[in-house]
Amino acid sequence: MKFAFTQVDVFTESPMRGNPLAVVHSADGLSDAQMQSFARWTNLSETTFLLKPTSPEADYRVRIFTPGGELPFAGHPTLGTCHAWLEQGGIPKTAGRVVQQCAYGLVPIRVEGRRAAFAAPPSQRSDVDGELLSRVLSALGLVPSQVRAAQWLDNGPKWLGLLLTDADAVLRIEPDDAVLKGLAKVGVMGARASGDTQFEVRAFAAPLGIPEDPVTGSLNASLAQWLIGEGIAPASYVAAQGTCMDRTGRVHIECERDTVWVGGNSVTCIRGELSL
């Protein structure tokens, strides 16, 4: 079987500076095993498969796979898949608004020029066990005085979120991946004093076989809901991510009433045909 294939770079305006995503179009004929096998082969953090929607409200349905398994929702695959679907001629039911169906449910996406933004799904928050937190900090090379706050954040993917004292503390982290693999996926964030971005973010996903993710939409969504809700972050800001990986990811956050929109640009790097 042959399928149209797109490789997209997400949360960037420049190719090879964001987070890559593989997108397989019209993939209804593929089995779960074939999808998982191809996701392992691409060796990207995520690979998505576009399918016909089963909800009358949705414009398309997507399944999202990491090399190690399927995710109910993820941020950069949402924006990258939307970009690829539109580029291949997808026409949304409502102009300027795409509705994505995924395992987590329906996700609204608004499209404004070259940038798209998804409405962050509800995020569940809970306290972090002190012993686990201590082990995570040790694996990251951090001391408790560098941590302003910690929370479990869950909007499909579950992250242990850490707010650090500043962006420099975030950038200095040198994680022990072998230890983190048995603990948790960890997202860290710290404020900048100046510059074109207000926060620096890093995402360590060793349990998924991804030591560090270049730019992570779902994590940024949960961090924004948490920190805006607590009055720590402003209602609108731009976060940088991927700096330590020589990436220039930019995540645009905007809170409107009770909805946090997570946006960014996407660019196509590869178009082709996949044989499976």
Image (spheres, grey):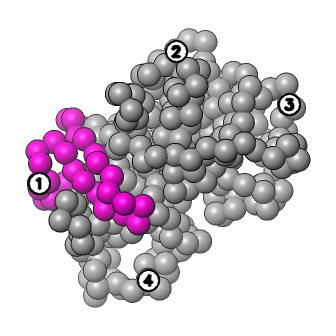
Residue of label 4: 32
Amino acid type, callout 4: Asp
N-terminal-most mark, 1 or 3: 1
Residue at x 65%, y 26% (from the top left corner): 190
Q: Residues within 10 Å of mark 1 (few under 14, many from 20)?
A: few
Find residue 179 and report its horizontal and vertical position in percent: 83, 56
Q: Is label 1 in a helix, a strand or a loop?
A: loop
Q: Is residue 2 above or below residue 198?
A: below
Determine whether, in the image, residue 215 is placed left or right of residue 129: left
- Residue 241: horizontal and vertical position, in percent? 55, 36
The amino acid type, in three-letter code, at marker 3 is Pro
Q: CA distance from mark 1 to mark 3?
A: 50 Å
Which residue is the site of mark 2? 195
- The residue at 81%/47% (across/down) is 129
Q: CA distance from mark 1 to mark 4?
A: 28 Å
Between discs 3 and 4, the one toward the N terminus: 4
Q: How many marks?
A: 4
Whether the magenta-drawn stretch holds residue 88 is answered as yes
| Residue that appears at 23% across and 67% down | 55
Q: Which residues are magenta?
A: 86-114
